[in-house]
Image (spheres, rainbow, N blue to C red):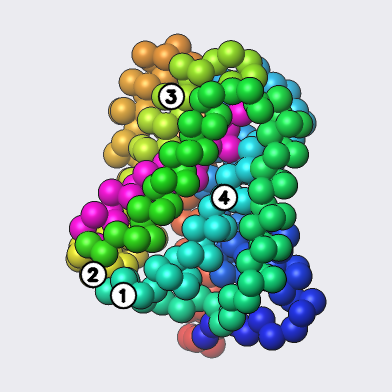
Amino acid sequence: MPKSFSTNRTRLLLWLPFAYAFTSRYHWPRDFVVNALTAWVPGVFLTSLLGGLGAAQALGAYALGYLVFISIYELGYLANDSYGLRHDPTPRQRVDLTLRPMFLVGFVGVRLATIGVAASLLGVVGSALFWAALGTLVVTLVAHNTLRSIELKFYSFLQLSLLRFSLPVFPALVVEGRQAAVLLVLCTGLMLFSLPRFLTYLDAKGRLNLPERKALQYHLKAHLTVAPMVFLLAFISAEPAPLWCLGWLVFVQLGYLSFSKAAIWQAGGEAAS
């Protein structure tokens, strides 16, 4: 059921970057934790290893980069949850929110200010690559929310997924003069993050029948299946960062598998008693 935002206080809270995403997409705890483990932790790995930063510096740089990304992406979320539903063959109302002019002015204004401050702190205000990446995100969001053909939305979704994984890492690479490493981040994101989500999106839109995707071992097997390409990326680039991401995600899936089987075993034991 969509949540109601009837109070002025809650509306003001939604002005804060990430508040709208958390309320409408990153539900606590499952969605938030899954996103943290599968996107944010690998992103910090890439920021640290490719940007030559210590753990604390990488975490700070990634957090600021993510603030820039989510400030733009939430505008796309808001558009998707309002205008975008008109042309969606499988509409899903995530929030119950009346878009009043004052709310929109504050929502957009706070996010534009956040982008400016974060970009200044990151030292990328003068970077053409940084602004080109943001421009790509904006154009793709507009396309995704205005395209009426679902078969074309698949292409915009894949690009959005890649930017969602990669864009928070870009500023650290730009500052360190490692623009070429951006391609490595994109390729790593495609293999380990975007491809599984693309299949999920196809399934959600009724264009793919893949019941095996719901199996506990599915994502573990998927990561192991793309491992050869990840090893090739690491070999070509002479960078261990893709292997760190692969190893982490395999570790996460092994933990999930162990936890799920233990829960099933415990539930079976309680049912038998």
The residue under label 1 is: 90
Q: CA distance from mark 4 to mark 3?
A: 23 Å
- Residue at image point 60% right, 57% down: 33
In the drawing, does residue 136 fall left or right of residue 225? right
> Between tags 1 and 2, which lies in front?
1
The residue under label 2 is: 206
In the drawing, does residue 187 fall left or right of residue 74? left
Image spot of residue 69 (x, y percent): 58, 45
Circle 1 sits in a helix, a strand or a loop, which is it? loop
Is 177 rendered above or below residue 96?
above
Give the class, few, some or many, for how many residues have Cα within 10 Å of label 1's Cα (few <14, many ≥20): few
- Residue at image point 54% right, 53% down: 73
Give the class, few, some or many, for how many residues have Cα within 10 Å of label 2's Cα (few <14, many ≥20): few
Circle 2 sits in a helix, a strand or a loop, which is it? loop
Give the class, few, some or many, for how many residues have Cα within 10 Å of label 4's Cα (few <14, many ≥20): many
- Name which of mark 1 and mark 3 comes first in the sequence: 1
Part of the protein shown in magenta:
150-171
Q: Can you name the residue that lies furthest to the right here?
A: 9
Is 207 rendered above or below residue 173?
below
Q: CA distance from mark 2 to mark 4?
A: 28 Å
Q: Amino acid at mark 3?
A: Leu
Q: CA distance from mark 2 to mark 3?
A: 32 Å
Q: Amino acid at mark 4?
A: Ile
Q: Picture quarter containing residue 205? A: bottom left
> Between tags 4 and 3, which lies in front?
4
- Name which of mark 2 and mark 3 comes first in the sequence: 3
> Between tags 1 and 3, which lies in front?
1
Circle 4 sits in a helix, a strand or a loop, which is it? helix
Marks 2 and 4: CB-CB under 8 Å?
A: no
